[in-house]
Image: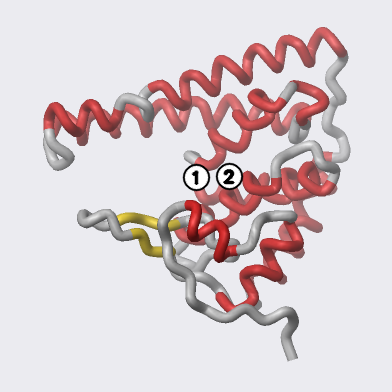
Amino acid sequence: MNYITSLIILFVCVFPGYGQAIKPNEEERKALKERLETVFMKDQIFRRMHKDVEEKYGSESKEVAYFWEVVEQQDKVLEKEIVAILEKYGWLGISQVGRLANTTIWAVLQHGSVATKEKYAPLLKASVLKKESQPVHYARLVDRMLINSGKPQLYGTQFEYDSAGKGTFFPVEEPEFINQRRNELGLIGIQEFAKKYGLNWTITQKTSKL
């Protein structure tokens, strides 16, 4: 069973359970917006400090190791908070809580467990199709989930740089069809994306499978 088939089955199994999600009223939306924006600050504040910490102590130091232990512990706390919101309200769209609060849900799940990503990815996809969430967030969530599981990514959003600053994409499933998948989400072509980040993409694209 390939990943696409698995994701479809996952969507069918998981999504119906969220039909009972509560639709927040105006007061609840305002409270959720403020709560989620605070969560975003907590999610990002340490990550914005990590370069300074690495420069001061060295990337392989015990201080940096402890720094990431603290970040990981906080990630687990924030993940539980976001899951509680998802379980009660479903995936809150941009029109409900604004772009930053909507982004918070994705950002926290992006740093969460593979199991949590798998469970709630279908809700994000549904929100994207309603134009209530950003397509790039779904692509990055799915790609991170696959890479974390030791599988090739689908949309090419995950890459890394070596010590010399050369960027390389993590493995991609059927790379000759990546633009077809990206186009379906409304993302820019992989060549343009690669150029934007100083990466190289040479695989010729196909429009459909035989």
Residue drawn at 37 percent across, 63 percent down:
168
Nearest the viewer among 203 and 27 is 203
Image position, residue 97 (x, y; %): 75, 21
Q: Where is mark 2, residue-wise?
A: 116
Q: Quadrant of residue 72?
A: top left
In this rendering, the count of numbered labels is 2
Mark 1 in CB contact with mark 2 (< 8 angstroms): yes
- Nearer the observer, 20 or 98: 98
| Residue tagged 1 | 113
The picture places residue 77, in percent across and down from the top left corner, at 48, 26
Give the residue type at disc 1.
Ser
The amino acid pointed to by label 2 is Thr
Quadrant of the drawing holding the C terminus: bottom right
Residue 73 on image: x %, y %? 38, 29
Vertical side of 141 occupied by 184: above or below: below
Residue at position x 55%, y 29% in the image: 80
Instruction: Give the residue at x 65% y 12%.
Output: 34
Scheme by which the image is coloured: secondary structure
Residue 106 in which image quadrant: top right
Looking at the image, residue 93 lies above or below residue 158? above
